[in-house]
Amino acid sequence: MAKLFAYLSAIFLLGFGSCTSSVDHSEKIGSLQSLQTELLRAEDDFGQINFEETKAMFGRIEADLKAVQESYEGDMSFKLAKKLSDYREVTKMVKDFPRRYARIKSEIERTKGQLGGLERALTAKATVDSKGNEITPEYVERMYNQEQKVASSLINEIDEMCAKLKSAQTRYTDMLPQVTPILDSLGINSPE
């Protein structure tokens, strides 16, 4: 029985050894963990965006400007045109917000999965990926660089969107009291 156990243990170790790599990826694993932490921070910031409120803000600006365009008659003074132009600029700070928001939300999940999957493969010292590709040092370098680039780009995009939305909200709050009298003078009932 002891010989059988020793024999089975040897087969198991040989089999397991053939499925694992002896290459040390601890530096890449640490870097992937840092990227994941940074992505979680960015995801938390992204989660602070109130999608419905922000969408409504941009929608209100568009509706107000459309109503002014349809209701205003005659020549517009430079001062009035400037105020309306400044109001429109708020919508340009984060163009196509709903589509970009949905894409980023989806990309966060995909990127978390990719970073986690690569980290798990390196930690397990896997020799093949989920598609059967051999995991060589070159493969690791290529995949690491690709995922690092995608994650860094996504994190920067999230940070930029959050900063621009904060500026857009501030600008909107500043512009609304200037635009409301214009809307009132045209009989446009803009919701509060």
Image (spheres, grey):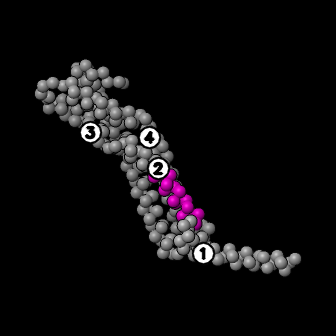
Q: How many marks?
A: 4
Reading the chain from its start, which is encountered first: label 2 or label 3?
A: 3
Quick check: can you spot residue 151?
A: yes
- Given the image, on which type of amino acid does mark 3 rest? Glu
**Amino acid at pointer 4:** Ile
Q: Earlier in the sequence, mark 2 or mark 4?
A: 4
Residue 49 is marked as: 4
Q: Quadrant of the C terminus?
A: top left
For marks 2 and 3, give the CA distance.
27 Å
| Depicted 109 relative to depicted 25: above or below | above
How many angstroms separate mark 2 from mark 4 (CA)?
15 Å
Badges 1 and 2: C-beta atoms under 8 Å apart? no
Specify the label residue 21 is tagged with.
1
Look at the image and give the residue range highlighted in magenta: 107-121
For numbered disc 4, what is the local secondary structure? loop
Mark 4–mark 1 CB contact (< 8 Å): no
Q: Earlier in the sequence, mark 4 or mark 1?
A: 1
Look at the magenta stretch and give its main secondary structure: helix
Q: Element under label 2?
A: helix
Q: Position of residue 24 (x, y in %)?
A: 57, 74
Q: Which mark is residue 89?
A: 3
- Residue at label 2? 106
Front in this rendered view, residue 81 or 189: 189
Q: x, y (%) of residue 60?
A: 33, 31
